[in-house]
């Protein structure tokens, strides 16, 4: 009796897990088969969309690498993402630290205020920001993105890090001051090593936020060689109402797999980072 | 020369006055205990000495040098927090060597000093562990070793034994004192536990509500309390206080004994109506009322086991206090009155 109930409970959990696995894996499966199907198979309403009805082909992948600047987009994306991550770290770490430790009562409300700026949508901000970019003569350059993306990564990451720094006992930091450190020394030698999961979290976040950004990139960049993946793929592979589904899906697959791998490798620390930022 | 001298320290947190004109000076090699109830400002005073907090008024001198505005790193002090504050991401070795590494000491010297400090506290075999793999007692030793390793001018300890269980506490107390005697570093030790204070201190500073009530040796604090606060805070059970006209008469429970066999001594006699006898094995506590006109007549007597007089609740006996054991306090200010005379029974 008891065994049966336990078994049923287990079964329900596994069924739910299975459902979510399918749910999560389906987009990858869809991208995968679409990328390798022949066009005839793809556009034939008679054929089963979930399976290969004709032999697979590499023509889409060849087209993606041969006839578009896809590799260039990937490189651009990493350049922009890397630079944005660096800028975010350099600004968000000291900002979050001073807001949690030094600003006293004001720190908390300032932190919330900073987070609120993250909620202003790019669809509003790209208009004034495009004036700024043209004033700085950065149009059509990756520098425009490197300059603009931190406007949303920094507020978000600062707020996230504040939660981390708050969870580190004050005693430990003061002990470092007594043991001969300066404030900054205590931050570098004690606070930062204790917040590695927080820092990892903001690295991944800043990178993926800038990788998926669309509106600013679309507004500021139209030269093909300077595009990032997020705008290069849809603008070069969708011509009017012609969707090149094969290469589109191949591009989507190639750029999403590394992110998926990184996320799952650091999932534990990532969740820890996120809940800590949220609850404390 | 005083290792630590504190003059006129006043500290406000916002509107609240936490320390009120505190003055004290340690002597060389002294073990000075700050004793007072929770919330009286002991930790704040220690943090001001360490430089973690700035006083609103007053100055701090360490080793004869004024350090009031200086950061902790410029004071050459060591402090052990109540929580031990070990660095969780470092091994025991890295924890102990941290104060040396911030001074850029060379590798060999560090090895040697850490080995010495670890040996002193018997934690040599724990050097590779992380703090989370240690017991409470071991953590406390690591914290002490880290504090001692660079030979500070003064050693500040904030209730370092309060996280240990009662059994460990007694042995840790003994160890701490032996070690302090051996090293001879001036130590300021904070506690709210009067037993700890009596056992450890060369001198005790009794504090209450941000003010120093008395500074003295354990015996002075116990037998010559400066006021009624000290009289009732130190000792368990505390000093008996009985109202008598304009004064409060105070005497220790162990001075308040049956008259039998003491008729010849210079004693003051009292009628004592016993209400309750508590036999604790090593001693007997006898509760009751002084049989004279007084609003506050409840007193306790503490009898050593060699006093065999049988006492029963509900009966009245004659008890006596040696005249030298009687202290008189001003009823309004609570301050000790120096003259002992004119006590009526
Ligand atoms: N940072 C602070 N801000 C405001 N009040 C404080 C602060 N630190 C301590 N206090 C207050 O000062 C008083 C003394 O505290 P403390 O020195 O920690 O006492 P103790 O160590 O004797 O228990 C307490 O009433 C406490 O609430
Ligand atoms: Mg305290």
Image (tube, coloured by chain):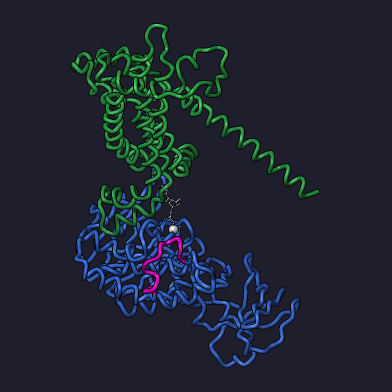
Is B327 placed left or right of B145 in the picture?
A: right
Is B68 placed left or right of B38 in the picture?
A: left
Q: Is residue B224 visible?
A: no
Q: In which quarter of the image is residue B147?
A: bottom left
Q: In the picture shown, does residue B209 fall above or below B237?
A: above
Q: Is residue B25 magenta?
A: no
Residue A129 in the image, given as x and y percentages of width and height:
29, 16
Is A40 placed left or right of B33 in the picture?
A: right
Q: Is residue A83 visible?
A: yes
* Residue at the image point whose x is 59% and y is 91% from the top: B262
Residue B333 in the image, given as x and y percentages of width and height:
47, 61
Q: Does the magenta stretch include residue B126?
A: yes
Q: Residue furthest right?
A: A1
* Residue at the image point whose x is 40% and y is 18% from the top: A121
The chain coloured blue is B
Residue A134 in the image, given as x and y percentages of width and height:
22, 13
Q: In the picture shown, does residue B154 fall above or below B9?
A: below
Q: In the picture shown, does residue B50 fall above or below A191?
A: below
Quadrant for ligand 2 reads bottom left
The chain coloured green is A
Q: Quadrant of residue A232?
A: top left
Is B329 placed left or right of B294 in the picture?
A: left
Q: Which residue lies furthest to the front in this view?
A: A55
* Residue at the image point whose x is 54% and y is 84% from the top: B322
Residue B102 in the image, given as x and y percentages of width and height:
24, 59
Residue range of the region highlighted in magenta in the rendering = B123-134
Q: Choose between A22 and A148: the one closer to the eye.
A: A22
Q: Choose between A117 and A214: the one closer to the eye.
A: A214
């Amino acid at each position: 009796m008891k065994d049966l109930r336990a078994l049923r409970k287990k079964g329900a959990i596994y069924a739910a897990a299975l459902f979510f696995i399918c749910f999560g894996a389906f987009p990858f499966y869809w991208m995968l088969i679409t990328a390798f199907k022949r066009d005839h198979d793809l556009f034939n309403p008679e054929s089963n969309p979930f399976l290969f009805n004709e032999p697979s082909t590499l023509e889409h992948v060849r087209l993606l690498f041969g006839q578009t600047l896809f590799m260039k987009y990937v490189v651009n994306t990493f350049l922009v993402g890397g630079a944005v991550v660096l800028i975010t770290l350099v600004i968000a770490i000291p900002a979050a630290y001073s807001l949690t430790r030094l600003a006293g009562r004001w720190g908390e409300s300032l932190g919330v205020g900073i987070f609120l700026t993250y909620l202003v949508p790019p669809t509003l901000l790209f208009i004034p920001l495009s004036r700024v970019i043209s004033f700085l003569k950065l149009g059509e350059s990756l520098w425009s993105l490197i300059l603009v993306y931190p406007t949303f990564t920094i507020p978000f990451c600062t707020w996230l890090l504040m939660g981390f720094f708050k969870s580190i006992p004050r005693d430990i930091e003061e002990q470092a001051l007594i043991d001969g450190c300066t404030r900054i020394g205590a931050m570098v030698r004690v606070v930062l090593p204790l917040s590695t999961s927080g820092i990892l979290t903001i690295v991944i976040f800043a990178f993926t936020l800038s990788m998926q950004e669309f509106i600013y990139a679309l507004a500021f960049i139209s030269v093909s060689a300077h595009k990032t993946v997020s705008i290069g793929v849809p603008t070069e592979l969708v011509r009017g109402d012609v969707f090149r589904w094969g290469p589109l899906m191949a591009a989507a697959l190639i750029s999403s797999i590394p992110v998926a791998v990184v996320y799952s490798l650091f999932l534990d620390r990532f969740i820890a980072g996120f809940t800590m930022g949220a609850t404390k | 020369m005083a290792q630590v001298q504190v003059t006129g320290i006043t500290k406000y947190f916002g509107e609240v006055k936490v320390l009120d004109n505190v003055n004290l000076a340690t002597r060389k090699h002294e073990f000075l205990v700050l004793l007072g109830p929770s919330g009286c400002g002991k930790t704040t005073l220690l943090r001001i000495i360490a430089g973690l907090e700035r006083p609103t008024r007053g100055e701090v001198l360490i080793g004869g040098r004024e350090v009031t505005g200086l950061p902790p790193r410029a004071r050459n002090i060591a402090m052990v927090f109540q929580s031990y504050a070990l660095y969780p991401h470092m091994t025991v070795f890295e924890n102990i060597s941290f104060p040396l590494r911030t001074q850029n000491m060379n590798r060999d010297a560090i090895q040697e000093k850490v080995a010495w400090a670890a040996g002193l506290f018997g934690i040599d075999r724990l050097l590779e562990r992380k703090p989370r793999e240690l017991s409470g007692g071991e953590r406390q030793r690591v914290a002490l070793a880290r504090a001692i390793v660079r030979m500070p001018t003064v050693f500040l300890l904030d209730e370092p034994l309060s996280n240990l269980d009662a059994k460990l506490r007694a042995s840790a107390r003994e160890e701490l004192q032996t070690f302090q005697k051996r090293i001879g570093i001036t130590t300021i030790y904070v506690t709210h536990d009067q037993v700890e204070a009596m056992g450890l201190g060369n001198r005790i500073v009794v504090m209450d509500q941000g003010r120093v009530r008395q500074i003295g040796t354990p015996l002075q604090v116990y037998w010559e309390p400066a006021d009624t606060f000290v009289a009732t805070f130190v000792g368990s059970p505390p000093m008996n206080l009985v109202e008598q006209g304009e004064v409060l008469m105070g005497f220790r429970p162990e001075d308040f004994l049956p008259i039998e066999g003491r008729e010849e001594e210079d004693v003051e006699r009292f009628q004592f109506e016993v209400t309750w006898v508590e036999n604790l094995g090593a001693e007997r506590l006898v509760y009751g009322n002084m049989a004279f006109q007084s609003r506050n007549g409840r007193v306790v007597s503490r009898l050593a086991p060699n006093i065999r007089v049988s006492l029963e609740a509900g009966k009245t006996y004659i008890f006596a206090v040696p005249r030298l054991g009687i202290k008189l306090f001003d009823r309004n200010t609570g301050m000790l009155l120096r003259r002992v005379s004119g006590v009526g029974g």
